[in-house]
Image: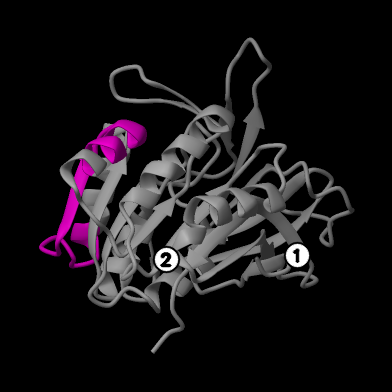
Amino acid sequence: MTPLETLVAEPWDDWGLIDCGNGQKLERYGTVTVARPEPQAMWAPALADWAADATFVPGSDEEGGGRWVQHRPVPEQWELERGAVRFNALLTPFRHLGFFPDMAPQWDWMRERADGAEVLNLFGYTGVGSLLLSEAGASLVHVDASKKSVEGGKQNAVLSGLGNRPIRWMVDDAGKFTAREVRRGRRYDGILLDPPKFGRGPTGEIWRLEENLAPLLADCRKLLDGDSRFLVLTVYAVRMSALAIGELVRQSLGDLGGKVECGEMAVREESRGLLLPTAIFARWSRDPIK
């Protein structure tokens, strides 16, 4: 296993971290600016006045997730793009904007290995990663327990002109779907996992990261073989070490050879260039890019 690495998402035309500090972050999503809680931004912000279009206010334990306060009108959804892929941003009840921009370095890394690949995207959310891989030449099986997220992915595919690409959009529990694929004798060239800390499947299945991740990885290993190219695992919002998930991936896939990398994901702030950590990751790849 290689030493810990840091993967940095740099700003692009339709997204950037403008500033962060005092437990908050200010971002731009196209022409819309939003302020959201960010516990890891423990330092002082660079700018005195953020003037965001909308601010997410967390709720108390009794109230639930929280709510958005709009200081100026924000569309119900609006289009963004990364490269040739277009997708909708929106103010979700979970403080997210419909995609995770810090995944950009992972998307780019997988795209380099995607041409002609069959890829399984588990916990695929609204499909931005699936569409970027599809645009790079992969065929996809996209799995998410949320019907709304999967429908959002289909809409994003149409926006991107990729509606006829070989993508199977599946509303299903990730663990159950993967186990069925193992029983069917399926194989994949690549797998992307972006699991939540806690979640529910479409028929009430319970997902707990600490309990279910290792068995899921074991099943993912059975879907890979000596010709497979990669597996990427990202983990958010948990008290877990990158070294721990790196070792889990190494032990799960070590018999395939290749290389395991692990470390932190971060985004670069535009005001000062500092790095704001967002998640941890581990990924396996078998062969160098040809």
Q: Is residue 253 left or right of residue 55?
A: left
Indicate whether 18 appears above or below 207. Answer: below
Highlighted range, magenta? 157-181
Q: Residue at x 50, y 37 (%)?
A: 213
Q: Residue 136: horizontal and vertical position, in percent?
A: 29, 75
Q: Nearer the viewer, residue 263 or 276?
A: 263
Residue closest to the far top: 62
At label 1, counting other C-alpha atoms closer than 10 Å, the crowd grade (few under 14, some 14-19, many 20 or more) is some
Which disc is residue 226 wearing? none
Q: Nearer the viewer, residue 168 or 16?
A: 168
**Residue 180 belongs to magenta span:** yes
Q: Label 1 amino acid? A: Leu
Q: Nearer the viewer, residue 131 or 222?
A: 222
- According to the picture, the residue beneath numbered tag 1 turns out to be 275
Q: Residue at x 45, y 67 (%)?
A: 107
For residue 158, say whether it is visible.
yes
Cα gap from disc 1 to disc 2, whole angstroms = 26 Å
